[in-house]
Amino acid sequence: MLGMALVALDGTIVSTAVPQIVGDLGGLAVFSWLFSGYLLAVTVTLPVYGKLSDTFGRKPVLIAGIILFLIGSVLCAAAWNMPSLIAFRIVQGLGGGALQGTVQTLASDLYPLKERPKIQARLSSVWATAAVAGPAAGGLLAGYADWRWIFLINLPVGGLALWLIARHLVEPARATAEGAGEGGDGGRDASRTGPGGRDASRTGRGSRDASRTGRGSRDRSRTGRGSRDASRTGRGSRDRSRTGAGGRRRPKVDWLGALAIFATGTLLLTALVQGGVAWPWLSAPSLGLFGAATVAAAFTVVVERRAAEPIIPGWTWRRRTIAAVNLALGALGLLMVAPTVFLPTYAQAVLGLGPIAAGFVLSAMTLTWPVSAAFSSRLYTRIGFRLTAVIGITLSLLTLLAFPFLPFPGEPWQPTLIMLLLGAALGLFQLPLIVGVQSTVPWSERGTTTASVLFCRQVGQSVGAALFGAVANGVLAARLGGGDDFDSLARTLTDGTASEQVRRAVDAAVDYVYVGAAAAAALALLALLTLAPRRFPVLTEEALDGTRAEGAEKPTTHQGTLRTPRPPSPPPPPAR
């Protein structure tokens, strides 16, 4: 939870110190890259860290991510101008990608299915606390100390998290990721006995049996036993050098695929983030970036198809459950742009609230989200993961559609109530999907699966920021008869001197954004109804861990409730 707190606090605590940072370092024209660069780094590294955690384990990836994040924090505190601070924020994002995905995966590893909603609700409460405490802490540090302390404060928190993880986190013996990329959906049955290599010697059983057939020859050439033993010893050392310690094959990392994914994500997200802001959508830089992203994506597909253990395996889209969750959480990232990006501007411009009060209107959503997420376990264990998520996204759709019906200018409690309802609905939607999809894959595929759904959510958020920004700018231009930028208009509205026409234009623009968010919720609902199976193929705890003994009877599954087969009834007593 401390590791997740580093990521959760980072965005909220930095945003409040932007005026002080710009006043000290300059670079007002490019300061938005303090957040865009961090988001790019987190997004494009999620699939890479997911595969690495499946290959080498969660603990080393988590430790490496915390160290990299802390190094980036120190460098950010020592930044001498805006370009250097942006570069060091990207370093922070490289570590944040490891934290965000691996913590979610580790929660699934350490807790059984019935207890996962509780830990996921606690992780959600970390984000809720960060939404409230982050701006306050950032404002205090920037106002009464120095803005560099907003990065240095990460050191004690991260150091404590690093010490606790290194000292107390012990990963149980699990199945390795060997064979995860073979045969399409491989990896489920490969190396079931875990990294200890208990079955590694089974592959040599045939050679031992073959040597037994030559028992008669031992009497004829006993003097050559030493040479045969020596040759066997050399053969064993050669086998051990090939497989590594414990009889396991050395893991293969698809570094070329990782670089290709990094390049594709960087090009695509840069085009989405900067399009319509730094240059027009149909300009040469925008079209060039989209074209380069298309070429890089095609190259990535070719590389991943040929890789022995690809970073993004094909089964993440061939399996209906994972594909449906990918699309549904991508739509979630899309719709989340409406409250997180546009609601604070609406609260200040239309309702006339200050920045702090506007932030509390948004934070109302984070109060009901963890409560609803914790309650969802009682629901999905009875009616299933898909139906619970369908109920949640349907309520979200209705709540988003209610926003355009708010009166102008309205009262602050009205959008606050909508945010409370939206948080409760999304808690029923997101958590069952994450817990459900993690429960359909074994340990060796869980990191990749978790990273896949989080990656789709991050990409959806980037697409939503670009799409809804264009929608808002278009509505403002149509209502005001000009081409003013939405962000510049929002800044002029904070002093309360704007005309009612401008305020109504902002109100209409945000209404259209919420209608677009409702359309994204409808897409998520469509993905669940058409792609997701009615019953998620949940594996048993033994199968999830990859430690089920060979030859044991496979327990049956039923949605979120794990059922083991009944023992056979005893034979009837013999007749006398």
Image (cartoon, grey):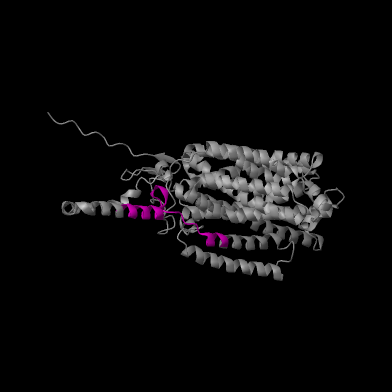
* Residue in front for this viewpoint, 87 or 390: 87
Note whether 163 is above or below 192 in the view shown: above
Q: Residue furthest bottom?
A: 284
In percent of width and height, residue 196 lies at: 40, 44
In percent of width and height, residue 38 lies at: 67, 53
Note whether 304 is above or below 352 in the view shown: below
Q: Quadrant of residue 551?
A: top left
Left or right: 269 as drawn, with respect to 214: right
- Majority secondary structure in the magenta region: helix
- The region drawn magenta spans 232-259
Left or right: 560 as drawn, with respect to 210: right
Is residue 534 in sight in this rendering?
no
In percent of width and height, residue 3 lies at: 61, 42
* Residue in front for this viewpoint, 345 or 267: 267
Q: How many marks?
A: 0
* Residue in front for this viewpoint, 499 or 373: 373
In percent of width and height, residue 91 lies at: 66, 52
The quarter of the image holding the N terminus is: top right
Q: Residue furthest front?
A: 223
Q: Quadrant of residue 295?
A: bottom right
Q: Residue furthest top?
A: 576
Left or right: 545 as drawn, with respect to 503: left
Note whether 192 is above or below 168 in the view shown: below
Left or right: 45 as drawn, with respect to 143: left
* Residue in front for this viewpoint, 462 or 217: 217
Picture residue at 16% right of the left edge, 54% below the top: 220
